[in-house]
Amino acid sequence: MNKLIASLKKEALLLWSDKVGLLMMFLMPVLLVFIITIIQDSAYKMVNENKVSIIIANQDEGEHGKKLIKLLSNSGLFDLEQVDIKTTENLKQELLDNNKLTALFIPRSFSKQFDEKAANISQSMTFELGLRDEKPTPLNVQIVNLDFYHDPILQENYSYSITNVIASFLNLIENELMIASIYNEVGIEGSPEGLKKQMLANRTVINSMAATNSAKMAQPNSTQHNVPAWTIFAMFFMVVSLGSNIVKERINGSFLRLKTMPTNYMLILSSKMLIYMGVAFLQFALIFAIGIFIFPLINLPQLILPSSILAVIITIFVSSLAAVSYALMIGALAKTQEQSNGIGAISIIIFAALGGIWVPTFVMPHYMQVISNFSPMHWSLESFYILFLKDGSWLELLPVLSYLFIFILICQLVTFLKLKLEKLI
């Protein structure tokens, strides 16, 4: 026991002497969590809260163009600016020159085409129902077109969402016009306003909510995603410091000198693991504290901890053990410190990309989702998502942690065999 304590003190002093390495292990995750969370929170707000700037050029000679603009304005989703522009080319140039996100051009014949289409359909309906003797002649009614432009930087899925909103308002106008046309066909002047409102209001409401196991869990937001994700990334990045430390001791003969001393190198190796796992716990404690106490002060969503703190502690323990085991393996396999730093850093970036730290795995192609299963960060992140997004149970958590245990065993075995092969242990 005394030997272990002495070894821990020695490793702690060595780690403390590496000020640059410590700075990377603590300052980097703090900066990453702040920067990425602020950026993604702005994106969330842009979709859910902020108004979208849109330029509207209304050349319509009827009333339907004005009605569409009124619906868009009353929706509260858009920051409208009407301009007197006659052509689509000029509107497109106006969008680019004034750094607006979107633009909508309503053509001159918009209301006329709407009216002709509604009249033709209502005549066909009344004939099919036997309320009209003469079969209407099919009109060559052109499809009603609107021209929508968006800034090239606007992502396609976001642009698609905006056009869907505009399309829903067009359907609203079309349905109202259709009701009026049908009443006109059957000889009733002016459709009853009560019936019209009832028909237009008869829409199914879709309540969207995240499926969690606890009502206290926060809805998915930038904090719940990014705090665990980027802490995991920083924790695995300790491969640069620990891996380099192992290589240095192998190169300068420290391993061989330790064999002549009355101690076991496995004890030294264990003390290194414990020290760096302690660093991982401190990383989590620091970033979680920032998410809980600092984020609300700068108008970012607060980090909500899951109901089982024990599950969080065990998940941190397994994840940190996986990170340390990987760092030991890289240190054992690398021949120089440059190799350890290069291979370690690049591999962690690849693991992060595959594991869903940067891009969610569900948006990846199927074959990439299969490959992501080989990233330890994927399983570490999944375990934290189960806790922080779903407030999941042990039954959900244990299968995910089992993959990390397999990864840990492989890394430990490779490290032992490599050091044994070199007769260092």
Image: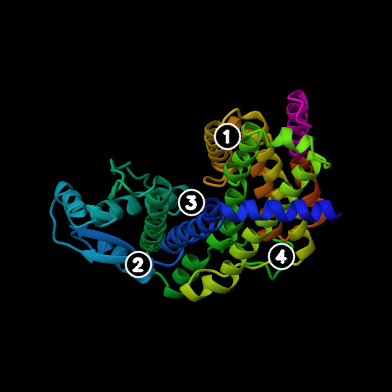
Q: Which residue is mark 1?
A: 340
State the extent of the magenta-drawn residues as a range. Answer: 406-425
Tell me, for residue 306, which label it has, or none: 4
Residue 87 placed where, x, y %? 14, 50
Q: CA distance from mark 4 to mark 2?
A: 42 Å
Q: Main secondary structure of the magenta part?
A: helix
**Are the residues tagged 3 and 1 within 8 Å (C-beta)?**
no
Q: Identify the mark nearer the N-term, 3 or 4.
A: 3
Q: CA distance from mark 3 to mark 1?
A: 80 Å
| Crowd tier of the residue under label 2, counting other residues whose Cα lies within 10 Å: few below 14, some 14–19, many 20 or above | some
Tell me, for residue 71, which label it has, or none: 2
Q: CA distance from mark 3 to mark 4?
A: 60 Å
| Mark in front: 2 vs 1 | 1
Q: Which residue is mark 3?
A: 129
Three-letter amino acid code of the residue under disc 2: Leu
Q: CA distance from mark 4 to mark 1?
A: 36 Å
Three-letter amino acid code of the residue under disc 4: Pro
Three-letter amino acid code of the residue under disc 1: Ser
- Report the residue that reaches farthest toward the top: 421
Q: Identify the mark nearer the N-term, 2 or 3.
A: 2
Three-letter amino acid code of the residue under disc 3: Leu
- Report the residue that reaches farthest toward the right: 1
